Every structure is written in C-alpha cells, then in structure tokens.
Amino acid sequence: MNPPSFRLNPWWTWLSRLAGGLLLLLTLLGPLYWLYQRSEEVVPRQRIVEEPTPVISVPLRPKMLRLPAGAFVMGSTKFEDEKPPHLVKISQSFALSETEVTQAQYQAAMGENPSMFKDRPDAAERPVESVSWLDAVRYCNKLSEREGLSPCYQIQGDDVRWLDVRWSDPRCPGYRLPTEAEWEYAARADQSFEYAGSNDQDTVAWYSGNSQNETHPVAKKKANSWFLRDLSGNVWEWVWDWYADSYAGAEKLDPTGPKQDVNRVLRGGSFGGEADNARVANRDRSAPFYRGRSLGFRLARSIP
C-alpha cells in the first residue's frame, strides 16, 4: 500500500502550491479587472441617477435625471445666432426631466389641457403644447407646491423673477426651466453628434420628414448617452433665457442669458420643422406670452 501523499511531501510544499494557485487565479482575473477599470474610465459620466417620483395616483411630472457638472463647447459656426462657439462650464450637478412634460402631467397639475392634439387616442403620452413661456413657469411653481418645495418664481402678471433675492441664478429649491446652456449641455451629453444622441435625425427626432405633421408620444425615439429623450424634435422647448442674437460677450460660467429682452429662447426643433431645427446648437425665440401648437417644455431642478 502506498503511503498518503501528504506524508511524502514536506508541509511547506503545500504552501507553495497554494501560492501558485493564487497566482494562476490572478493571471486569469487580472485582464478582466483591467477591462472593467477601463470601462469605468470611459463612461463614468453616463451614470445618470434617477430622482424618485412621488407616489401619487396621477404622475405630475416626468422622471428627473441627475446630470453631472462639466464643460462643453456651446454653439456652432453654422448660423449667426449660434456664433461664436465658446467653452462653457456648468459648475454644479442639476436634474433634467427625461422627456418633455406630457399632456396628462400638465392636466394633472394645472387642471386644464390646452393642447391642439388632445383628441388623439394616445394624447396623454404626447408632449403638452400650445403653452406659453408664462404657462411653463406657472406649471413649475404649481409642481413645486404640490411636492412641498419652495417655488422658484415670483409671478405677477407677465413679470417673472426669482422668488428669493438670494437666487440671482437658477439655484433654487423647486422646479424651474433649464437655462439655455444647461439645455445644450444636456442635449450634447459629452458627444459630438449633430442631434441629441445621433447624427441620424430619424433615430432621435420627430420632425417634418417623419412626423405626419403632429406630435408623438414621448420616449419613442432613441435616447442620448445620458438617457434623455426628445431633446431633438417633437416640440420646441422653452428655456429660461432671454434671447440674444449671438453669443458675443456671453458669460462662460453658468450663463443665464441677457438681463432683459423681448423674446425668450426656444430649443430643440419640432414635429413641424426641418431636421436642421432639431440640431443641438440650433436656436429660436418667441414672445413669452405666445402659445403655438409646437411649443412645449421640460423641467430642471437644482441639486442642493
């Protein structure tokens, strides 16, 4: 009978075998860990955190996604009001709604639905339109109150100001419209596409070439790399800023636009416009009291 193998080998050989096994395991797992680390370095800013939605019977708003602070080149050389391209820094993380506010959400918060397409079977999921800039900021205040947050705006007729004098910029507790810089920053999402999420307009946008001249339910097109949808096409989106016909002299750190003007900025293009209007750099404007069948909005919120 052969003696047990552990009697034939000194005890320290088992330690060397164990060490060899560990080295072999590290050799196998090492490349996998390296690949994981590389993926962490490449896409860390794409990890967008969803803000919780209050548990209520009828949702009053879209999902809010937390976006990272960062910098980007705003504008383009294509049209005069997109010039000059300039580096802009967004110094603080903020939240932006995944989609435009829908007809159902606006109806639930405001008790009315002004939309031209409210007779469609899927109207509840379509973006609300035919809303003015003033309607949009009133919705923001109403939503803040419904969720127990301090409203951002003091609204007296057509005059809209920050409710607290300390809020000389968008850092307020409640819901608000995004600034123009925040909007373009979110639409670009650290990428160089012409449209929000692609160079192919049909994959990300409802525009005159594919919309049949009407709005469509939100979130049916491809999202951009930060999981935001419909930033290109469907409806124009009101933002906070007054319109200026160029970026000459514009602030580079958390810009909020001119102090006063006649028109507010619109972004993103719409179902009735050409694909060119849906580019991430494209700009338009309208009087803040104007309601058009292609005008809607999405929400922003500062993160404390």
Image (cartoon, rainbow, N blue to C red):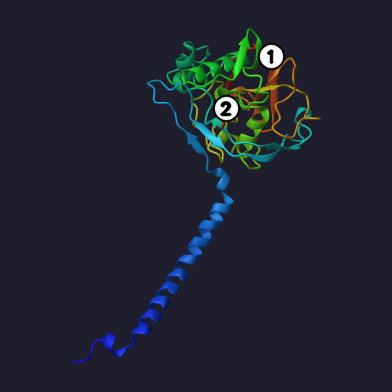
Name the image quarter holding the N terminus: bottom left
Tell whether 264 sits left or right of 143.
right
Name the residue at the front extreme: 166
Name the image quarter holding the C terminus: top right
Q: Viewer-proximal residue, 30 or 151?
A: 151
Q: Nearer the viewer, mark 2 or mark 1?
A: 2
How far across and how far down the image is residue 67, in percent?
57, 37
Q: Viewer-proximal residue, 209 or 171?
A: 171
The residue that appears at 47% across and 18% down in the rendered structure is 146
How far across and how far down the image is residue 191, in percent?
63, 43
Residue 195 visible at all: no
The residue that appears at 27% across and 88% down in the rendered structure is 7
How far across and how far down the image is residue 180, in percent?
67, 28
In the structure shown, which secondary structural element does the residue marked by tag 2 occupy? strand
Name the residue at the right extreme: 249
Name the N-terminal-most of marks 2 and 1: 1
Residue at image mark 1 = 287
Q: Name the disc covering residue 300, or none.
A: 2
The residue that appears at 60% across and 38% down in the rendered structure is 200
Q: Viewer-proximal residue, 257 or 151?
A: 151
Residue 138 lies, with reference to residue 80, above or below; the image says: above
Q: Circle 2: is it few (<14), some (14-19), or many (20+) Cα within 10 Å?
A: many
Residue 296 lies, with reference to residue 231, above or below; the image says: above
3D distance between C-alphas at marks 2 and 1: 21 Å
The amino acid type, in three-letter code, at marker 1 is Ala
Determine which quarter of the picture holds residue 170.
top right
In the structure shown, which secondary structural element does the residue marked by tag 1 occupy? loop
Q: How many marks?
A: 2
Residue 142 visible at all: yes
How far across and how far down the image is residue 293, in percent?
58, 15
